[in-house]
Amino acid sequence: MDTTALLKKMTLRQKLSQLTQLDSSFFLKYGTSELTGPLHGMNIKEEDVACCGSVLGAIGADVTREIQEKHLAADPLKIPVLFMLDVIHGFRTIFPINLGLACAWEPETAEKAARISAKEAAASGIHVSFAPMEDLVRDPRWGRVMESTGEDPYLNSLYSAAFVKGFQGNDLREPDRVAACIKHIAGYGAAEAGRDYNTTEIGLNTLFEFYMPAYRAAVDAGAAMAMASFNALNGVPSTANRWLLNDILRKKWGFKGTVISDWGAVEELRMHGAAKDRKEAAYKALNAGIDIEMMTSDYLQFGEELVREGKINEAEIDAAVLRVLDLKDRLGLFEDPYRSASADNEKLLLLCEEHRKAACEAAAKSMVLLENNGILPLKKGMRVALIGPFAEGKDILGGWGCTGRFDETVSVYDAVKASGYFSEVTAAYGAGFDGADDAELEKAVKTAENSDVAVLLIGEHQDMSGEAASRTDISLPAAQKKLFDKIVKTGKPVITVIFSGRPLLLS
């Protein structure tokens, strides 16, 4: 596709639409009364949606194909949309969280996880994964620790490149590949006090020696996209940081791909105090090098005015649009806007036996044995008691397991019982995350007393980590400590299995 020739056919308004990303609800309402006039308070009109460049959050081949078909019928220039989604540690087949994958010390395991994720996501119509997240983290109170690969810049860099290779391969035109989007540029993992979205102050030596290498590794590996971080870095919000996005990312590192904002981050420049209104926010983001504005409409509302006033040169907008069009061309969307998206491919690939086996192997490699005083390995034929909220619970996929399903999840109890390794397998809840019921505690004690060994399955609920899930207290919930003490007092051998999205205080 001659994207330069295509660009020349576009009006300025159509160009700004290409730089706007909307969620799937806008596209599923073509021709309905809800799309006449403003929608969602964003003043988005039907003609804007018709020329929009990308879609966020659409899941399923039937849905993405429907949106693409309606869009191509409505868009005067027949430019296909990009579908993007947070595919963090698996699509339908869920792998260990990224922090867990890092504990395997095998970048090739991460590459395989990304390869399988790409196959499944592509079968559902996804073109871009908002991954890998390679923010170096030193404060485990931060909720997004679970998305990272830890605190070592060298290990982070190896994993970063492995994820990109797994998602993209050598040719994005392969229909079962997706584009990788490295995030979050830059230093998001240094949020003060571990409070999500908080500001960061990072000295240049620390920034470039510790925080930047993993991002750079993804760029060198050919990542097609990059996402600017929510935080202000040394006083300047990344969404408005031209030095970061232009001088470092594009000029120094040679990044040729597309840069996207995080959700609503352009408009949030006002909250940072970096822009007095939405018009200035649009100007600062465009000037900094943000090609795609995610889920706000400041470019659309004020871009034409900024060009008329001479504050933004239309050539800068053209360059951004070309980067978006070139990504679509690299993915082969102009030749086949649907690629491998089909219900048949979903049935063939999603949660297939090969993928489940790979996820199981990755989980085994990711587990960390902290201490063994002779209890392990357990002997065949023993009577085992599984105790705690994770014994029979199925909410064990981890944060950002967005497309995984609990009804397809195998509990620890079901898996251990099905193995046939033990003569008897019993389970008791014992205590959860907010409190402990005396009757439940007593049942757990009796279950342990009637066994040869007690396995305590405790830790954080998956909603206790992830975005906007920072914690001031990273020890075990008090109810689980009480459960632990009671089970230990039975005198039975105890094995403790920790489920968590961050390092926990286990003292």
Image: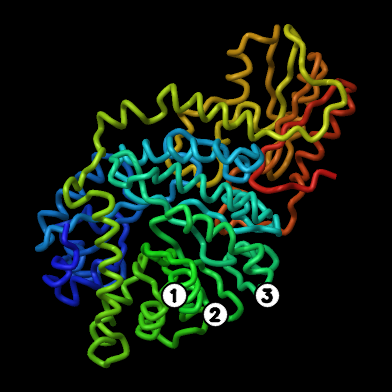
Q: Is residue 403 above or below residue 230?
A: above
Q: Residue at x 53, y 54 (%)?
A: 133
Q: Position of residue 327 (x, y in %)?
A: 29, 57
Q: Residue at x 72, y 47 (%)?
A: 503
Query: Which image quadrant is residue 430 in?
Result: top right
Q: Quadrant of the N terminus?
A: bottom left
Q: Position of residue 68 (x, y in %)?
A: 19, 50
Q: Who comes first in sequence, dot 3 or dot 2?
A: 3
Q: Who comes first in sequence, dot 2 or dot 1?
A: 2
The three-letter code of the residue at mark 3 reads Gly
Q: Residue at x 22, y 72 (%)?
A: 15
The span from disc 3 to disc 2 (Cα, nearest Å) is: 14 Å
The three-letter code of the residue at mark 1 reads Asn
Q: Under tag 3, what secondary structure?
A: loop
Residue 236 badge: 2
Q: Who comes first in sequence, dot 3 or dot 1?
A: 3
Crowding near pointer 3: few (<14 within 10 Å), some, many (20+)?
Answer: few
Q: Is residue 194 above or below residue 443?
A: below
Residue 237 badge: none
Give the residue at mark 1: 246
Q: Under tag 2, what secondary structure?
A: strand
